[in-house]
Amino acid sequence: MSLTELLPIAISFEEFTDIGFWTSVGVLAGTYTIFALGLQINVGYTGVINFGQVGFAAIGAYTMAILVTDASFSFWLALPVAVLVTILFGLVIGMPALRLRADYFAITTIAAAEAIRFTAQNARDLTGGNQGLLGFSDDWDVVSDRIEIWLEWLGWSNPETLFPLLIVVWVVALLAAAGLSVLQRTPWGRVLRAIREDEDAARALGKNVFVYKLQSLSIAATLGAISGFFIALNLNFINPDAFQPLVTFLGYAVLILGGLASYWGVAVGAILFWTVLEGLRYLDLPFEDAEIAAIRFILVGLALILLMAFRPQGIFGKREEMVLGD
Amino acid sequence: MTSDTALAPVGSRTALQVEGVSKHFGGIRAVNGASFSVKDGSITALIGPNGAGKTTLFNVITGFYRPDSGRIVYEDDSIFGKPSHSICQRGMVRTFQITKALAAMPVMDNMLLAGPNQPGEKLLGLMTRPRRARAVERELEDKARELLATFNLDKKADDYAGTLSGGQRKLLELARALMTEPSMVLLDEPMAGINPTLGRRLLEHMETLRSERGVTFLFVEHDMDVVMKHSDEVVVMAQGQVIAHGRPEEVRADQRVVDAYLGGAGTEVSEVAPKPSEGAQRKVSDAKSVLRVNGLVAGYTPEVDILNDVEIDVREGEIVTIVGPNGAGKSTLMKAVFGLVRPRAGSIELHGESITGERPHNVTRKGVSYVPQLDNVFPSLTVRENLELGAVAGSSIDVDERIARMFDLFPRLEERQSQQAGTMSGGERQMLAMARALMPEPHVLLLDEPSAGLAPAFVDAIFEKVEEVNATGVTILMVEQNARRALAMSDRGYVLDLGSNRFEGPGSELLADPKVADLYLGGGSGRVDAPADTDTRSDRA
Amino acid sequence: MTGAPRTGLASVRDWADANPARVALAIVVTIALALVVTEGLQNTAQTSLNGLSYGAIYALGAVGLTLVYGILKLTNFAHGDFLTFGAYLAFLVNVTWELPFALGVVVAVVATAMLGLFFERLMWRPMRGKGAGMLQLLLMSIGLALVLRNTIQFIWGSELRSMDVDVFSTVSFLGLQIGRTELFVMIIGIVVLLAVGLLLRYSYLGKQMRALSDSVDLAETSGIDTTRVITYTWLLAGGLAGLAGALIAAITNVKPELGFELLLPIFAVVVLGGIGNAFGALSAGLILGLVIEWSTLVIDSRWKLAIGFVVLILALIVRPQGIFGRARTV
């Protein structure tokens, strides 16, 4: 009897040895690591319940794409400019919204992100509407080809197309995680933690809480924008569908899985999450693709519910440090 | 209104000046034109009965609430309406009534957080002056260790603040406040919840800081011994205003202050003699017991018991009042009887049947109604709707007829029956709350400080109503701040202190007993120095 | 700087703060009049009719959400999917089983009510017992939303479907045209809205619900059986959501994203009406419905949902307690 006959649920194991599968998982995991690092600094370390992170990704990606395709910017110049534009958006939304109570702030950020996506859908002249934008990745393709040459030189005769992207996204992700970990251990990071636990205590000790929250939001905006770039490069084109609220929700799932306590935990959570989620595609069940897609997200929803009910601190979190909610 | 102070301790410069400050919340005026000043380098106490507005005033001064009007000047600069972090940066630091030691962070981090002017706390500073940031951090760490040592917390520096006992957290909060290098420290009930030994140490530190570094202290306190023995000046608040200001001995002897605490403020103080409807002295009834509490132990947080073995007996048709200083556990007792707080030990019996730990709405159905002190009406519902909800659903009472009777008893409510309860004044709300509690025709009515925060005219009205209600046969168990008025109209009273029974007896006897007054205003057998309270284990709170 | 007496502009603002309902009414009437002048009475009246239909639906969706928030402090992101659930159940009865639409509506209402109660017993009550915090509950509701939407998608697929209702005949009156089905939806919507309003205002249960929205503790103290009232609140919230879903599916189409797309306008209504204030939700729903439909006279209709966002964000920033809410700490 083969392994597939022994298991109650048949999983197509061949996929798991396919380098294409792992590259694809790796790129998604890396992208979501960067995305969720932004959530971590907001939610896990400052107590800012940001549900609009996908909006930052959208602004980053669209700004970059528009600058390259419409305004003929160099790709490498468009990147930092797009980051700055995203930070600006973050400040514009953050300044009035951060005065609000945590759950109102959450609703505001979701609304803002949806408004951005809605605009992307309807401002056809600027954003291409539902058709989206493409043609921004020429400069990246040059780099990607170069990396492929290096890989061939190292002995890999026919490298996977997305592998260069995989390398780059993880270099960025790990640098970001390292940078944030270092930042967390500074006095600045200490103030953030104090704010998360008790804003009034921080204020009573002379800390301008509002400014710190804005800084935290700006960092999240930066990371959101960067993850948006990787989403764009992964698909080679962007459209509003890539920036649905579901992305933020999946980001939270990654965040909770890794635990609200550590930046490195985010990376582990992302890898685990995407391995399982992508792996589920290959469930050899008598269902159509669309149905399997639905099952995968049912399982994500269930995972969120069960995590919240039974292990809200995730894998690496500590129960004593869990200051989740009020 | 204020007594002059030619005997100021250290110079006569004013550190803090508060003039005509007011703050209201909806219809309630928590602070109503308070004015006083604090001398530079003094230790000043802010005292006053429950609901006087002390913590609200604290929050206003330190920028946590925005005042409606007035002037607040600190070291010659106006701080009216300035945000709290800015006020701290100017040198005024505060602690909180319920400690805000950051439990999820280590003790040392708590201390380092408080250091002022850290370049490492700014992103720009981190990037442009990393070495300076590190140097400052090291200096702060040394300073923190020193401070922690003076409070005996240095060994705990690396532990999470959450592992500290309640008393240690209070000390940590003070040590942390001192890290900010303040020129003025505002302490909100620093003695609450810590044992006398630790308390003494705290006071010693305050005095040392005052004499060595000229730090000014303003603290809210209920422990009268502490106030009388350790403060240079005392400011007394009642009903949102400052009613007296001067040296402790002066204030203690001030009749207005005595009245504010013991009650009788309002109508003729001399006529505090009981005025029962029959005209004769109220006798201790020998009717059977309606409500009996035995050996009750209860609290809110796992480590602390607020009630320690309390015994109360209420007989049919009586008015029984429970009095005692703040922190005695009077409100907690009420809540435990009614089922809002789970008792840890002991029993509560109604008509001989146990109701220990029963859910409140079941207790109501058994004939006991409760009027909480605060949040006792549904603000978005009208007066009439509030009353309708009091009538316990499903029972066969004629709601309209019952409401009509309530309107007879409280005519003012009839005038306002379509008004939203949230727009009414404190006194009107109190009446509504009582009427609502009376709707199901309870046998026993529990009243939690019915006169708290009310204007004198309303205080009279409320107590009259209580007597009228009692005359219809309802047994009353009341907790009151206004000890005199309440005891005068009660059959019997209990005096609670620190969660245990201290005195009990007929109302008129307790009224006349000087020991009761001492308990409120300090002096006599004070609690800080009483041998029974001393604990040799210095770490235990 | 002392607190000087407020003059001029400041005192106008104070009056506006104290009389929000009148200000809102004035604004709405002004917009209506402006539109009558610029776009004509006919157009204004026609879009007003649509506005009332949609507005009633938003209101029905919002009442449940606001009551659940007010009483249980739960921001229920799965509420939109209750609407979707109702729509699909009506579809099942109407199209798959070929029964009259009205019956489908009834089934939708009952089933969604039970669904709401089911999750209260299964999830929300135990979590409250554990002392779960706001973020925990929020994330759970998101998980639930994912489960519900994708289960529906699993069963029915993601294509657009339609109810088996009359999409052709129209009714004319006063020079205005309205589709037969649209008329039915509007009438049902408004009738139920009024019924809910009357229930909340005059019935004992309604008063109890409003009382719990003010303070669950005080309600418990007053002898109200809070568990029972919470049960009825979920039944009401679920039932109204199911109704709203079935109705809107009848005049648009049936798709798995139906509810989530409506969730943001519904949140806008909840905030606008004052969170926790059911009457507020009813009025704000109609107002938002009108404003959104009126906007199609002035801007390209594909942007009309943006009005929902704008209203929500403006409301949160300018007046978070909504038109009818009290200035509690937000």
Image (cartoon, coloured by chain):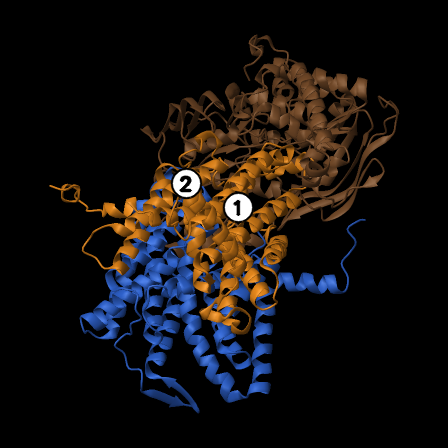
Chain colours: A orange, B brown, C blue
Foreground: B459 or A120?
A120
Q: How many marks?
A: 2
Q: Amino acid at mark 2?
A: Gly
Name the residue tied to disc 2: A269
Task: Kindly identify which chain the residue marked by label 1 belongs to.
Answer: A
Instruction: List the residue tagged with mark 1.
Output: A38
Residue A31 in the image: x percent, y percent?
A: 46, 49
Quadrant hosting residue A48: top right
Chain ID for label 2?
A
Q: Crowding near pointer 1: few (<14 within 10 Å), some, many (20+)?
A: many
Image point (50%, 28%), residue name? B491
Q: Is residue B351 above or below residue C253?
A: above
* B22 shown above or below A317: below
Residue at disc 1, secondary structure: helix
Specify the farthest residue to the left: A1
Toward the viewer: A235 or A127? A235
Point out the residue furthest to the bottom here.
Answer: C175
Residue A55: horizontal and vertical position, in percent?
A: 52, 57
Label 1 vs 2, first from the N-terminus:
1
- Residue A52 visible to an observer of this rendering: no
**Tag 2's secondary structure?**
helix
Depth order, front residue of C217/B134: B134
